[in-house]
Amino acid sequence: MILIVDDTPENLISLKKVLERHNFEVDTAASGEEALKKVLKNEYVLIILDVQMPGMDGFEVAEAISGYSKAKETAIIFLSAVNTELKFITKGYSSGGLDYITKPVDMDILLLKVKTFYRIYEQSRKLIEIQNALLDEIEFRKQAERKKDEFISIASHELKTPLTSVKGYIQLLERNIDKGDIETVKKHLGKAQVQLEKLNELIADLLDISKIESGKLKFNKKHFVMDAMLDSVIEIINQSNPEFKIIREGKAELEIYADEMRIEQVVINFLTNAIKYSPGTSEVHIKLSADNDQIYLGVRDFGIGINEAQQKHVFDKFYRVEETAIHFQGLGIGLYISAEIIQRHGGEVGVKSILGEGSEFYFTLPLNQEKETD
């Protein structure tokens, strides 16, 4: 927008009409004081400022405007019918003006200057946008690098832990085999198997991340009943966590078209997280429902919960809730992989949580959808 400042009404009207005919948005002020009030409220690309005005003259107005952080970059063109001497033109520039036009105004020259200033303004704005985008991009590279370094450190630790445990159990096995203590051998074998399963899960997650990044995560979709798959998952979880009671709420005896193994992977991830982040509790609830369009599955725990600010990040790659990172192991990629799987099936993931009261992680999947989304 352009602001024209002149104490002569006919000058305001004529300049405003000419500029508006050339599709410029124009505002006017009849005094320096009025101009300053408008500059405080509005943003202007250009101010056309008369020098000879009662009260504050144009030079004083320009100097005042240059002191406003909001408007100090605004271009100013001075108009003057009297002060055409070099010293006055110099004063105009030193007051913050970028150009000086004498009256009577040659409208063609004024229009040319206005268009030039607008073009410079647009170019400057684009340069600023590019600069800001580059700064954001650099900051994103830095954050990504920090996350990568953090992830490598965590992954190294997480992979090393089960490997160290397996190595220890093998050494114990060697000693007990020599002694012929079969019961102890069986016990150590069972513990080593648990650690190997952990290692296998970590490696599987890393492979999934690699497939997602390279666009090679494929799905084997078919029709299956969610209820039947859920029974199988609950049986698996009960075997490894007999101390937890998994309570089902609702049914969905309908077929969906999806990759059963991948959907099972998501449900297992939700359930194992619910148990992992619920120390001191003994129940996890699974909510299952369906309508004509979609199926809903939610896993509700009564554990530590997640604060509102962190909830929007829990499905981000490598994200680990800060308060829990020290106490609970994990790579911070399970939920990211789960989100990718569900979204690639045309569904949605989400979380509802209250800090200290527990969380409900859920996903929805469309029913009767056979169109490939991967």
Image (tube, rainbow, N blue to C red):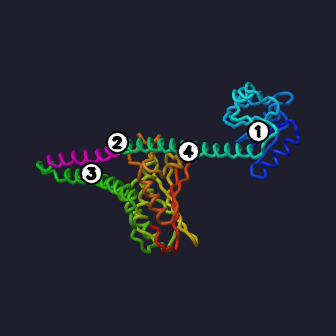
Is residue 356 within the magenta segment? no
Q: Nearer the viewer, mark 4 or mark 2?
A: 2
Q: Nearer the viewer, mark 2 or mark 3?
A: 2
Q: Nearer the viewer, mark 4 or mark 1?
A: 1
Q: Earlier in the sequence, mark 3 or mark 4?
A: 3
Q: Earlier in the sequence, mark 2 or mark 1?
A: 1
- Residue 191 image label: 3
Q: Earlier in the sequence, mark 3 or mark 1?
A: 1
Q: CA distance from mark 4 to mark 1?
A: 48 Å
Q: Earlier in the sequence, mark 2 or mark 3?
A: 2
Say if 178 sits above or below 32 in the image. Answer: below
Per the image, label 4 sits on a secondary structure element best described as helix
Residue sitting farthest toward the right:
9
* Tags 2 and 3 touching, CB below 8 Å: no
- Can you identify the residue that label 1 sits on? 48
Q: Which residues are magenta?
A: 155-175
Q: CA distance from mark 3 to mark 4?
A: 38 Å
